[in-house]
């Protein structure tokens, strides 16, 4: 029986390999939380080794245009210093123009989820699951390096 206090290996739980059933294409899903330089390097290495046709990232082209200028940022701690500036270019800013009770309810729920994730999983104070970070930056850099098509999905979690 596994120890309930033992955390799972991040390499086993954040990477899922699927095979598309109609054409047999391989699909790799990488879950990110933008908390670790090690996981960002893992994502970069995975893309460079697999050389996919397409890499999908949950951010906007404007965010990547600005994050790509940070050529010498190579740790999550450094990336956190630029997060406020990069947030201006993410798709999350579009929520500022939408005023309704549903918006405030959604923001309240997201804040509660963020608090519970921090508390339960022991994430640091910089934990921001909706904010693109070093893993997204490294994924975009690796995609460009191997010549993969880069598609931007925005911040949606559907």
Image (cartoon, rainbow, N blue to C red):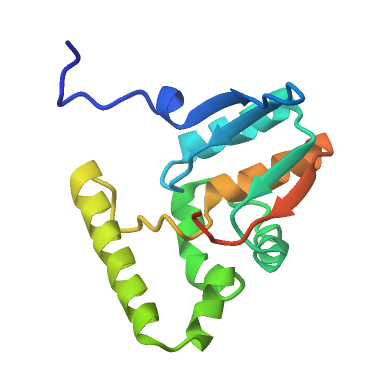
Q: Quadrant of residue 24?
A: top right
Tell me if 151 is positioned left or right of 90 in this view: right
The x, y position of residue 58, in whole percent, is 59, 54
Screen quadrant of the N terminus: top left
Taking depth in this image into account, of 76 and 8 the one nearest to the observer is 8
Residue furthest to the top in view is 1
Residue at position x 61%, y 59% from top?
59
Considering only vertical position in the picture, is 37 above or below 9?
below
The x, y position of residue 125, in whole percent, is 29, 58
Residue at position x 69%, y 47% from top?
140
Taking depth in this image into account, of 29 and 133 the one nearest to the observer is 29
Instruction: Count numbered badges in the picture.
Output: 0
Residue furthest to the front in view is 22
Considering only vertical position in the picture, is 51 above or below 85?
above
Considering only vertical position in the picture, is 1 above or below 58?
above
Residue at position x 65%, y 30% from top?
27
């Amino acid at each position: 029986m596994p120890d309930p206090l033992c955390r799972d290996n991040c390499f086993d739980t954040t990477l899922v390999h699927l095979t598309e059933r109609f054409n047999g294409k391989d699909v790799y899903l990488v879950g990110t939380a933008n908390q670790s330089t090690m996981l960002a390097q893992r994502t970069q290495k995975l893309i460079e080794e697999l050389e996919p046709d397409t890499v999908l990232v949950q951010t906007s082209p404007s965010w990547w245009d600005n994050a790509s200028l940070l050529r010498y940022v190579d740790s999550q701690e450094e990336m956190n210093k630029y997060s406020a500036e990069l947030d201006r270019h993410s798709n999350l800013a579009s929520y500022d123009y939408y005023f309704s009770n549903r918006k405030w309810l959604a923001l309240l729920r997201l804040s509660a989820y963020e608090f519970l994730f921090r508390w339960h999983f022991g994430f640091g104070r910089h934990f921001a699951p909706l904010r693109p970070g070093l893993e997204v930056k490294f994924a975009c850099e690796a995609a460009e390096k191997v010549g993969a098509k880069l598609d931007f999905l925005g911040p949606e979690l559907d």
